[in-house]
Image (spheres, rainbow, N blue to C red):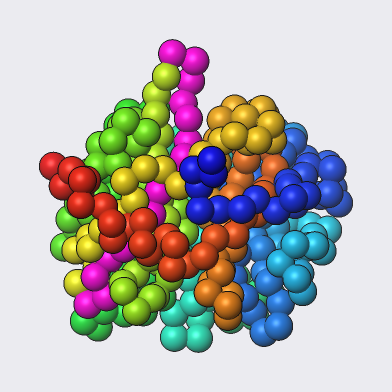
Amino acid sequence: MNRSPFERYYKNPIIKRTDIPYPCSSVFNAAVCKYKNEYIMLLRIEDLEGKSHLTLARSLDGINFDIDKKPWIEPSGNPDYEPYERLGVEDPRITLVDGTYYITYTAFGPYGVRIGIGKTTNFKKFERICLATEVDNKDGILFPEKIDDKYVMVTRPGGLGGQRNDIWMAFSPDLTYWGKSRVLMHHTSGGGWSSGKIGASTPPIKTKKGWLLFYHGVRQTGSGRIYRVGAMLLDLEKPYIIKGYSKHFILGPEEPYERIGDVPNVVFPCGAILEKDNKIKIYYGVADTAIAMATADMEDIIKLCLNSSENQPAIA
Ligand code: BMA
């Protein structure tokens, strides 16, 4: 029996290291959005030194991507950013807010990880806005709309070295100054599969029933961590209220390309696209080694979130 609402693309993975037109170590965890009539993907590529940068790719069908011949976002040399991005820029997410594409990413430096925010309107010029948090914070994702005149971002403070951690939410008038932080979901909410730590995965999708947010949950085992995916539905006006969430993980490593690689047993989505037929395409890094795609019916996922009466409270 199929235990996941997702159907994997039959020719997964859709992007592998050998598809990158320059030497690199691996490609994974990519942001995705639609821009004009194209799908834009922002790939996390790890170079041969082990540092990550971000490279653009474009596609008309969401499957076959033309990958740029050079990186687009690299660790910044600007002294305001350099000490904090020296070891790489990782795990991007793209959110369209009021006509501007905002890119959040993990800035990785000797002090730890911080959430970086930048923007573009044309996928040519990228402008950094700020490093929005101190260390250790990552998996920052913006909401596609301001709520009560504030930008809203989910974050994941802590989690260093595999320590447990939770998903938080913060608010800002200008994308630079963030406050009123609060816990959105506690790491044991989903049960054992997410008891190690959790973090938001993809930009929230607006549905009639609420904001649909995919998140990843980590289970620590005797032979390493397993990264899986769950979904939650947040109140449209008060997004810090969880209306429901999937009782079980809804996507987990099963296929050989998800099980075997640089970091085994990892499915790690950073992008999701809601298509006109209400199907969701989720793009996810597999085993920190390649990028895969799977589709699900939006209504099925919403049902899984709302039929979750047996769940424990989402926060402790
Ligand atoms: C997380 C992040 C992801 C990575 C995952 C599995 O903490 O670093 O970029 O895919 O671990 O290694």
Part of the protein shown in magenta: 222-237
Question: What x and y, as percent, mark residue 125?
Answer: 64, 74
User: Residue lying furthest top in this view?
Assistant: 222
Q: Is residue 246 above or below residue 277?
A: above
Question: What x and y, as percent, mark residue 315?
Answer: 17, 47
Q: Quadrant of the N terminus?
A: top right
Q: Closest to the observer: 158 or 305? A: 305
Asked if residue 111 lies left or right of residue 27, the reply is left
Please tell me which residue is depicted at 30% across the width and 41% down the height of the picture.
190
Please tell me which residue is depicted at 71% across the width and 77% down the height of the picture.
38
Q: Is residue 307 above or below residue 152?
A: above
Q: Closest to the observer: 207 or 198? A: 207
Q: How many marks?
A: 0
Instruction: Work out whether residue 66 can be spotted.
Output: yes
Q: Quadrant of the C terminus?
A: top left
Q: Is residue 263 magenta?
A: no
Question: What x and y, as percent, mark residue 77?
Answer: 58, 53
Instruction: Work out whether residue 50 can be spotted.
Output: no
Q: Taken as a whole, is the magenta stretch helix, strand or loop?
A: strand
Q: Is residue 196 above or below residue 35?
A: above
Asked if residue 12 lies left or right of residue 187, the reply is right
